[in-house]
Amino acid sequence: MAEPVLVCVAWPYGNADIHVGNMTGSHLPADIVARYHRMRGRQVLMVSGTDAHGTPITVRADAENATPLDIYQRFHHRFLDLFQKTGITYDLFTSTHTENHFDVAQKLFTVLKENGYLYTDTQKQWYSPAQGKFLPDRYVEGTCYICGYDNARSDQCDKCGSLLEADKLIDPRSKVDGSTPELRDTEHFFLDLGALEGEVADFLRQRESYWRPNVIRQSLGQIENNPLRGRAITRDLEWGIPVPLEGWDGKRLYVWFEAVIGYLSAAVEYAKLTGQPDAWREWWTNPASKTYYFIGKDNIPFHAIIWPAELLGAGTDFDALMGAADPQPLVLPYDVPANEFMNMEGQKISGSRNWGVWVLDYLERYDPDPLRYYLTMTMPETKDTDWAWEDFYNRNNGELIATWGNLANRVLGFAHKRWNGVIPEPGELTALDSELLAAIEAGFGTVGELIEGVKLRAALAECIRLASEVNKYLDVTEPWKVVKTDETAAARAIFTAMRAIDSLKVLFAPFLPFSSEKLHGFLHYEQPLFGSGFTQEAADTLGSHSVLRYDPAAAAGQWQPSALQAGRAFNKPEPLFVKLDESIVAAELARLGK
């Protein structure tokens, strides 16, 4: 089997539509990396699914007088639609509300308990006398006792990223009715993070040299400043995965504990769906496997501390429980390239204020590749960034079209007209021709290295720079003028430019798959760049549910420079992108009421 690469993507809560901040935070960077590794011929598995058990779902269900199942299913199907339209190529996008996920999560719970990393204790939890029930963490907000942020949840502060102890929250209030809850005793299972602290810290130090500074700061830095303590992994809930023990009715595995298990359970589900039930081990017990976790910065502690602790605590016993004859430990994260946040027009994206760009709404008016381009060029890799409609308009017309789209269209259009849809014979290439093609060929190493390091803004910027080099070459050679006096020289320049464009098509493909596939078709390739597309199918389920799967078979081996030959027929091109009118800026801001 080729080198295994597991691409794990933060599970979106099934309570709201996906906006551009969600896309650039996790789904899009994951897809770019997955597409690249597939093109390199590696065995990629990209997984995620709808988080069906997060308390945001029950909060919305309460507000709409609906069931959590109704809420999650509604948004789950909208997610499937969105990913197909934007080309997010999940090998499996599933849900945490499946029999398979329940089984895997309960097995991991059992293993951790048997290995001595779970214990029971009584803790204080917020209780609403008005509602007569305990309130899960997202039902309680207040002031963070560490940084003073006044909209912190009782389990985590979104501003400073700290994991919080609920009973220390200042001025707590119920999110449902604004009333003041009171602390009452309740018994729960705890993950003994203190017992695993040394192993988790060692794991983080091994990755300190190449992980992003913000991830190390929120993980290793947090451990060094605040020793780890046990953290409750069950809650008094009716919705979710039951605790697999007698006498624990009315308690559920808490979402932060079981949702990360979804990366593992999704791999198990994928293996079952493909008829190779043991194939999941290639990504989860093979030491050669590289596992990437694409998340937002608010999820760093769960993926860089708690999930590694769960994996370390499981040891080889989970694999043994799954029936392995020679059980192996589960693979720890290779990289957690967490992004910062994307805001919009200088303000935080907010669903309650309808302040944001929701992707399905965007797609009603614009194409997906300009969205992918803009979100990559403004990706919040090291600091928060901002969606601005004027910037979107300028980058679409002034970069994407002016540098790349026009280059491909004018060269192929001129060649098709002048040489009747056949790639011209170049004769012997000059030093200038060879230098250009060598520079483009070197881009496969440069861009590939940047993608492997998850430096996606720089990788796409390098693609644009290389396209600019082709434009400079054409400014010097001027084939559209030279053809009047020296057709051979013009043919040589056009052949060289077409070969460069064919290579650039591949370099752009992980970022701009739709236009790259279109250009691939213009050049009359028989096989597509990528696979045959998406399918939806029923899954083992605890309710009406379907999964999304992508067939990436054609991608393998595509990451290589052009070998385009003279004399080959090609198709008449069309513009790759739509030039936008400046009026869209005012129109979009008006839609937001600005």
Image: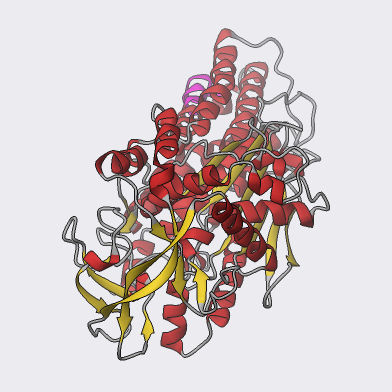
Q: Which quadrant holds the C terminus?
A: bottom left
Give residue 482's position: percent from left, percent from top: 57, 21
- Give the residue at the far right of this rendering: 275
- Is 178 located above or below residue 530 in the figure? below
Where, quadrant-wise, is the N terminus in this rendering?
top right
Which colour scheme appears in the figure?
A: secondary structure
Query: Could you tell me which residue is drawn at 44 percent across and 28 percent down?
Result: 206
The residue at the point 16 percent across, 60 percent down is: 148
- Left of 516 or right of it: where is 578? left
Q: Which quadrant of the figure has residue 435?
A: top right
The reply to whether the magenta stretch includes residue 193 is no
**Which residue is nearer to you in this view: 229 or 454?**
229
Q: Main secondary structure of the magenta part?
A: helix
Q: Nearer the viewer, residue 220 or 374?
A: 220
In the rendered view, tell whether residue 441 sits above or below residue 349: above
Residue stretch in magenta? 469-478
- Note whether 534 is above or below 167 in the view shown: above
Give percent across and percent down for residue 417: 69, 37
Q: Is residue 422 left or right of residue 590?
A: right
Asked whether residue 511 is in view, the answer is no
Residue 240 as seen in the image, left or right of residue 275: left
